[in-house]
Every structure is written in structure tokens, then in C-alpha cells.
Amino acid sequence: MNTASLLNNLEFSDKHPKISVLLETERSKELRITFKKGQVMKKHKTPFPIVIEIFDGEIAFGAEDKVTIVKRGDMLSLDGGIPHDLTANEESIVRLTLSKGDKVERVENVANS
């Protein structure tokens, strides 16, 4: 058994969203992304499906030519290959579930661009 906390060791970056790996299973990787208000993850796509949970805050999630406002407690799933972007409407904590085959470095590159 592995355990992790979305609240322990919280870090926010002044420059860009901050990515932290919480844990890995044989099938997935669980990441925490912290955003300061106004921070953006520019349009990108993943080769695998993803699931995001808004643990705290509010995110404008753009995909398929529309923007969906997702708030604390909301979750969404997105198939691989679909371009999407995220903008923090307020300071936010996001949980991102990646397929085991996906790379954390890809997410970090998007956050840092």
C-alpha cells in the first residue's frame, strides 16, 4: 500500500504551475498541480486518457472549442489526443491521473512553457 496527501508539502511557484508526483501504481501516476491565480498551462495534448480532479480552487478547462469551469470537488475525464488548456481563475490544487505509459516530464514541460 502507498499513501499520499494532496495537502502535505504544498508548494506554489510564482512563475508557472508546480508539478509534484504523489504516487505511482502499476497502471497510473497521480500528480498534484498547484496554480496561483492567473497561471496557465497552454494548449497541449496527451497520447493517453487523463482524469483531473479540482481539489481546491477553480480552473477554466478549454477543450473541443469550449471552456468548462471546474470547481472544488469537480472531476473530468478527457480522451488522449484532444488539445486542451487550463487557466487558474483562483489559487488551485489539481489532481491529475496519468496512464503509466505517460511521462511526468511531458507535463512539466507544458507547465514550464
Image: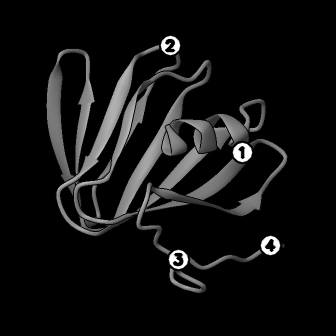
Find numbered disc 4 in the image and state the secondary structure of the residue it sits on: loop
User: Mark 4 or mark 2: which comes first in sequence?
Assistant: 4
Q: Are marks 3 and 2 in contact (CB under 8 Å)?
A: no
Residue 59, percent across and down?
24, 52
Q: Residue at x 27, y 69 (%)?
A: 91
- On residue 11, the disc is 3
- 108 and 75: which one is in front? 108
Q: Nearer the viewer, mark 3 or mark 2?
A: 3
Residue matched to label 4? 2
Mark 2 surroundings: few (<14), some (14-19) or many (≥20) residues within 10 A: few
Mark 3 surroundings: few (<14), some (14-19) or many (≥20) residues within 10 A: some
The disc labelled 4 sits on which kind of residue? Asn
Find numbered disc 1 in the image and state the secondary structure of the residue it sits on: strand
Q: Nearer the viewer, mark 2 or mark 1?
A: 2
The disc labelled 1 sits on which kind of residue? Ser
The disc labelled 3 sits on which kind of residue? Glu
Residue 67, percent across and down?
15, 31
Residue matched to label 1? 28
